[in-house]
Image (spheres, rainbow, N blue to C red):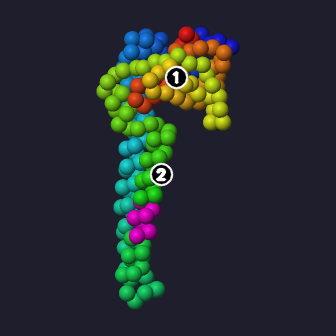
């Protein structure tokens, strides 16, 4: 089933004005605003949560280490707990960084896309694999893969012009070719 532009706009949250800007190789103001809060707020939240964890964890570790009846000298327990807390913090920051890159792309790339105000495009047909439905550029210098939850609704026989951010490869809009 081939969708009209209005149906595609509703399905992928873009307007016809956004599409017109994308055709000219630019992002609309609405698209730049949409990128900024939704994606970059996540990184700020994770930094704040990591700081809170450290500020709560360190006093707890110190209190347990200093009041532990297990040792007459609490220094070894205190040292062990600090090491465990540091290892936990490293694991947390590693997992947050991986989750950020997997779900939202690199924050620097998103900031660069917003600053450049550019939109790139390629022509593709929806394809499917074990990870889901995706759009992949076949004729660009560097392969670009776009994933989006609503791609399953696209007609697999229709060829689309896909507009995306050049560095972070976030879907901006699309239209039948």
Q: Spatial distance from mark 2 to mark 1, Cα to Cα? A: 29 Å
Q: Which mark is residue 137?
A: 1
**The quarter of the displayed image where residue 35 is located:** top left
The residue at the point 60 percent across, 25 percent down is 151
Q: Residue beneath label 2, please?
A: 95
**Bounds of the magenta span?**
83-89
Q: Let me know if residue 112 appears in the view.
A: yes
The residue at the point 52 percent across, 23 percent down is 137
**Of all residues shown, which one is farthest toward the left?**
115
Query: What quarter of the picture does the C terminus occupy?
Result: top right
User: How would you classify the magenta stretch by its main secondary structure?
Assistant: helix
The residue at the point 44 percent across, 53 percent down is 94
Q: Position of residue 103 (x, y in %)?
A: 50, 39
Q: Is residue 24 left or right of residue 11?
A: left
Give the class, few, some or many, for how many residues have Cα within 10 Å of label 1's Cα (few <14, many ≥20): some
Residue 105 among those drawn in magenta: no
Q: Position of residue 117 (x, y in %)?
A: 34, 22
Give the class, few, some or many, for how many residues have Cα within 10 Å of label 2's Cα (few <14, many ≥20): few
Q: Nearer the viewer, residue 120 or 88?
A: 120
Q: Position of residue 4 (x, y in %)?
A: 59, 10
Q: Is residue 68 above or below residue 132?
A: below
Q: Are marks 2 and 1 in contact (CB under 8 Å)?
A: no
Q: Is residue 85 above or below residue 68?
A: above
Q: Is residue 1 left or right of residue 136?
A: right
Q: Is residue 75 left or right of residue 163?
A: left
The kind of secondary structure element at disc 2 is helix
The kind of secondary structure element at disc 1 is loop
């Amino acid at each position: 089933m081939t969708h009209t532009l209005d149906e595609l706009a509703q399905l992928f949250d873009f307007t016809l004005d956004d599409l017109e800007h994308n055709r000219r190789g630019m992002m609309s103001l609405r698209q730049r605003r949409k990128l900024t809060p939704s994606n970059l707020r996540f990184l700020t939240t994770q930094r704040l949560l990591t700081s809170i964890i450290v500020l709560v964890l360190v006093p707890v570790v110190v209190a347990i280490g200093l009041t532990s009846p297990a040792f007459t000298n609490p220094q070894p327990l205190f040292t062990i707990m600090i090491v465990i807390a540091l290892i936990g913090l490293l694991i947390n920051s590693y997992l947050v960084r991986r989750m950020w890159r997997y779900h939202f792309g690199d924050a620097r790339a998103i900031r660069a896309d917003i600053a450049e105000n550019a939109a790139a495009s390629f022509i593709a047909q929806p394809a499917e694999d074990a990870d889901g439905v995706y759009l992949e550029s076949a004729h660009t210098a560097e392969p670009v893969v776009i994933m989006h939850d609503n791609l399953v609704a696209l007609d697999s026989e229709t060829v689309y012009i896909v507009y995306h951010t050049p560095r972070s490869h976030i879907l901006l809009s699309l239209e039948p070719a």
